[in-house]
Image (spheres, rainbow, N blue to C red):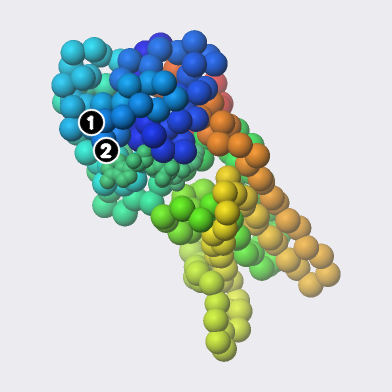
Amino acid sequence: MKIAITGATGQMGTNVIKKARDKKIEIETAVDREETTSRGVDVKNDEELKNLLKENPVDAIIDFTVPEGTMKYLEAAKKTKTPIVIGTTGFSEEQEREIERVGEEIPVLRASNFSPSINVMRSLIEEASKKLEDYDIEVTETHHNRKRDAPSGTAKTFLEEIKKARGKFEEVNGREGEQPRMEGEVGVHAKRAGDIKGTHEVLLAGDDEVLKIRHRSESREVFASGALKAAEWLKDKENGFYSFQEVLEQ
Ligand code: NAD
């Protein structure tokens, strides 16, 4: 498999380079906002992405950048008919709809988290929210001090699972002052510190007991491996909008 990596100097981009090398996957193209090198790979200016993909087609693009970057790279992917795996988070609803729509033109896979166990955790959350229907739920996520978006894409995905199980609820992002807990609301809390790779906890509490479902990423490599697995899976797919769960199910 041949890939193109966007955001090649970022935390995730460098991990994708490392994992691709470990798996003997060819990095045909790497781009970022400025020309440089990253882990020994030549990184080109991202303005050239479309031409680079035209000259040297790849099986998939792997993107971990920022929403405005992804939307730009999506155009290059569309114009060159290149499948794209998107790990970036923090999109607006409008951007999310546009990404899904591009699935009509090329294969697109977007996931807020490429860890296999986070995807298992999603099912556990749905089941617990359904079976413990009157328990209070609070979601807490902790990430490194450079993370831009809050709550994390993964926390938002967990909220979707709770919604599937319980229907609509009031989402309360942090609390301060006089703000008692209202029935049925779900509290969401984001902590930012150091170089924490990502911790997510969903707490369900009844009158006499507490259930905590908790995941801690020990390294960013787990996300890089998952994204490469997704690219391998996506490269021969028909046009469409796909999820990482579909990759794990096969
Ligand atoms: P980072 O800050 O280390 O890297 C960001 C990259 O984006 C850099 O290469 C930077 O040069 C580039 N960039 C910044 N602004 C840009 C712009 N306007 N246009 C184009 N490129 C731009 O961040 P990171 O830790 O590598 O995370 C990147 C994204 O991936 C974030 O959205 C993060 O939440 C997400 N992420 C997703 C997963 C997952 O499993 N889906 C895992 C980890 C991180």
The image position of residue 220, as x and y in percent, is 56, 36
Is any part of residue 142 visible from this angle?
A: yes
Disc 2 CB within 8 Å of nearest ligand 1 atom: yes
Does the residue at mark 1 contact the one at mark 2 (Cβ under 8 Å)?
yes
* Quadrant where the image shows the C terminus: top right
Image spot of residue 247 (x, y percent): 50, 26
Q: Badge 2 local density, few (<14 within 10 Å), some, or many (20+)? A: some
Q: Amino acid at mark 2?
A: Arg
Residue pictured at 55% horizontal, 87% vertical: 177
The mark nearer the N terminus, 1 or 2, is 2
Q: What residue sits right under mark 1 in the picture?
A: 45
**Which label is found at residue 33?**
2
- Which amino acid type corresponds to the residue marked 1 in the rendered image? Asn
Q: 99 or 131: which is nearer to us? A: 99
Name the one closer to the observer, 67 or 122.
67
Q: Can you see residue 166?
A: no
